[in-house]
Amino acid sequence: MTQSQLIQHISAPERNIRADKLSYQLKRENFSLRELVDLTFYHDQEIALKASRLLGYILFKFPENYYEDIEYLIERVKDVNCTSCKKPYAKIIMHITSPEVPREVRIAMKEINLERVVELCFEWLIDVKMLVSVRMAASEALFNMRHRYPWIAEELSKQLEYIIRDTTPAMLTKADMILSYLHPED
């Protein structure tokens, strides 16, 4: 499948996109993750969102098949402007920084400079206008990166303690959980 064929497939209004079937097809056909990442920046925001969701599905389901292109995704994440696309990207970052990802992904991630991603996650976390789901995923991604960048633990703790003063119940639950790991003695 080419990128233009994928665009046609996901843009057809009468189609209900099944991410599971489509992701298996893209995997079978060795569709380029880089092309899918590029498609998440498509000028039509509906196509960009569907591509972002598909990208998330693929990286949750088959991360070990795409570890060689994760650096490209990391380089591009700072360019995400579509608010709806930030949710899948935040979840992807949360997932690929998790200690539970396959070994190949963990090894690849060690070679990638994540400082810009850390900065972006803090931006998303402190933005009160950001979707709560993005803020929650960003906080967990930061928590996941705290061993690589030890200064994150203290800054994340400060930000979460400030956020919990006035936030949604879901964000409060996430913040409390992370703070309980950052401050187990409390």
Image (cartoon, rainbow, N blue to C red):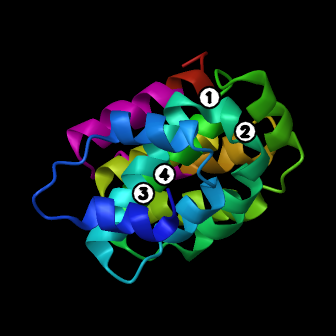
117 sits to left or right of 161: right
Q: What residue is rendered at 58% in x and 31% in y?
A: 62
The mark that comes first in sequence, 2 or 3, is 3
Q: CA distance from mark 1 to mark 3?
A: 31 Å
Q: What residue is rendered at 27% in x and 40% in y?
A: 18
Specify the label residue 146 is tagged with. Answer: 2
**Start-end of magenta stretch:** 159-179
Q: What residue is rendered at 89% in x and 47% in y?
A: 111
Q: Nearer the viewer, residue 33 or 79?
A: 33
Residue 181: x, y in percent? 58, 22
Specify the label residue 52 is tagged with. Answer: 3
The mark that comes first in sequence, 1 or 2, is 2
Q: CA distance from mark 4 to mark 1?
A: 21 Å
Helix, strand or loop at mark 1: helix
Q: CA distance from mark 1 to mark 2?
A: 10 Å
The mark that comes first in sequence, 1 or 3, is 3
Q: Residues within 10 Å of mark 3 (few under 14, many from 20)?
A: many
Residue type at tag 4: Ala
Q: CA distance from mark 2 to mark 3?
A: 26 Å
